[in-house]
Amino acid sequence: MISKYEVQETNKMIQESNLDIRTITMGINLMDCISDDMDKLCNNVYEKITRQAENLVVTGEQISKKYGIPIVNKRISVTPIALIGGATKANSYVPIAKVLDRAAKTVGVNFIGGFSALVHKGCSNADTVLIESIPEALDVTDFVCSSVNVGSTRTGINMDAVGRLGEIIKLTADRTKDRGSIGCAKLVVFCNAPEDNPFMAGAFHGVGEKDVVLNVGVSGPGVVKKALESVRGADFETLCEQVKRTAFKITRAGQMVAKEAAGILDVPFGIVDLSLAPTPAVGDSIAEIFEEMGLEKAGAPGTTAALALLNDSVKKGGVMASSYVGGLSGAFIPVSEDHAMIEAASCGALTLEKLEAMTCVCSVGLDMIAIPGSTSSKTISGMIADEMAIGMINAKTTAVRIIPVIGKEVGEQVEFGGLLGYAPIMRVNPYKCDDFIARGGRIPAPIHSFKN
Amino acid sequence: MKGIITVVGKDKVGIIGKVCTLLSEQEINILDISQTIVQGYFNMMMIVDLTNAKQSFAQVVDSLEKLGTEIGVSIKLQNEEIFDSMHRI
């Protein structure tokens, strides 16, 4: 029988440490919506999304009430639109972005991901059209998220795409400059993108997935932080054990919600993503975990080691708790979405270079980082290339979501609002990489990709 | 279906009585009950069976919450499975 202590522990996690289910994300395959007529295609897409996800939001709310645990976001991911739009021969996919936005609003989700292209080896015509449509699509829609996979361990890095995306990011920033260049917060450049990631902005429904599937992202940095308070000063074995135990409990809650939601919606359960995802709220921060581990600020020497052990322990605890773990599964370090990271960046403890080093050992990459609007597109491409190289060589997912905030310089701040938070403008290395990026072509696959 | 009710708040006369009255009106059976008072704070946990409950689970959650507001304590009803899944392998 459940003891009072266990009931209290769970409820304290929810009430005091911000334990929540961060997102239930319905993945929807749009392949059967393809048409050579753009209007017909848009109608098909709208019809399928609104039919499949009709009850997603209300189901999330029902489950939340039944178990007394908040389910913060309900979202949708769809097949990469570059794969859907090709047959139309259109020279812009903005109409598809608009219909995705409209469908998202109809069913009441707060983000829809999948305005995406997979170009890790090369761009098809449709991929090019999609990439060129990104700035306008992210400007004229509210909830659409976009991602482009430009590299993988198996194929190397498509440097033509990396070069062009530096420019696309600048164009997106410019088009949304009256809103703090927020368009760029909805655009992720990936290496080794997972096909079942429930988290935004990088979610899309992979081509190897079922027609419709339900993925769940758990969260709970606050819970880990709170649990670590009880082992202050203890050695690393004790520290890692405590993270594992906590991750296990968090993930079990996620697994239960995922199964329940899948059952009610009559949709197969996909995966649980074990990521520790912060929010701007105090007590829901990854950087606070570092501080609890004994670092003065995130970014201090020791931060990479702290993140490595955190990420690894979360996985070890979570893997046993769920039958299918997937997505990104690790610790997220989005700067603008974590108040203690923001402080660390503002006081100079955390630099872009340190963040890049940290991405070698955690689940994503340079995430939600605001940089001066005057940064050149080539420099942005250089930053993307560095991050993609880390992913390619280490056979892990890496991502870049940086926001060149037009009209702002180092020392200023940008406010995105809501879950996206606010961020100080960080200093970028001023030396140029123009000639390197201008080479174009593809970086060949690394030697350890030849596993056959 | 089993549920766990937790009641937390400043101690006063009649908390258990009011909660139990509501449960009995709803045909909800109490399986286990434990209660402590620490420094004037009332802390109760009940395990209840909602198989024959007159209202839906969500409606009972709301009624209990409303009662809690009336008597100045926090009353929460949750499906037992969340605790089982988090604390049992």
Image: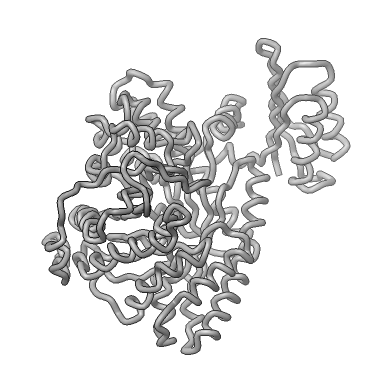
Residue A221 versus residue A256 in the image, above or below: above
Residue extending farthest top: B39
Image coordinates of residue A258 in percent, x first then y, are 54, 53
Residue extending farthest bottom: A36
Q: Nearer the viewer, residue A411 or B35?
A: A411
Residue extending farthest front: A407
Number of numbered tags placed on the structure image: 0
Image coordinates of residue A397 in percent, x first then y, are 29, 55
Q: Nearer the viewer, residue A418 or A310?
A: A418
Residue depicted at 59% across the width and 27% down the height = A8
Q: Which of B29 and A354 is in front in this view?
A: A354
| On-image quarter of the C terminus of chain A | bottom left
| On-image quarter of the N terminus of chain A | top right
User: Quick check: B13 left or right of A338?
Assistant: right
Is residue A245 visible to the viewer in this orientation of the structure? yes
Report which quarter residue A232 is drawn in. Answer: top left
Image coordinates of residue A193 in percent, x first then y, are 33, 61
User: Quick check: B16 left or right of A58?
Assistant: right
User: Quick check: B18 left or right of A338?
Assistant: right
User: Quick check: A156 left or right of A281?
Assistant: left
Residue A38 versus residue B54 in the image, above or below: below
Residue A390 versus residue A341 in the image, above or below: below
Is residue A361 visible to the viewer in this orientation of the structure? no
Report which quarter residue A271 is drawn in. Answer: bottom left
Q: Nearer the viewer, residue B8 or A113?
A: A113
Image coordinates of residue A9 in percent, x first then y, are 55, 28
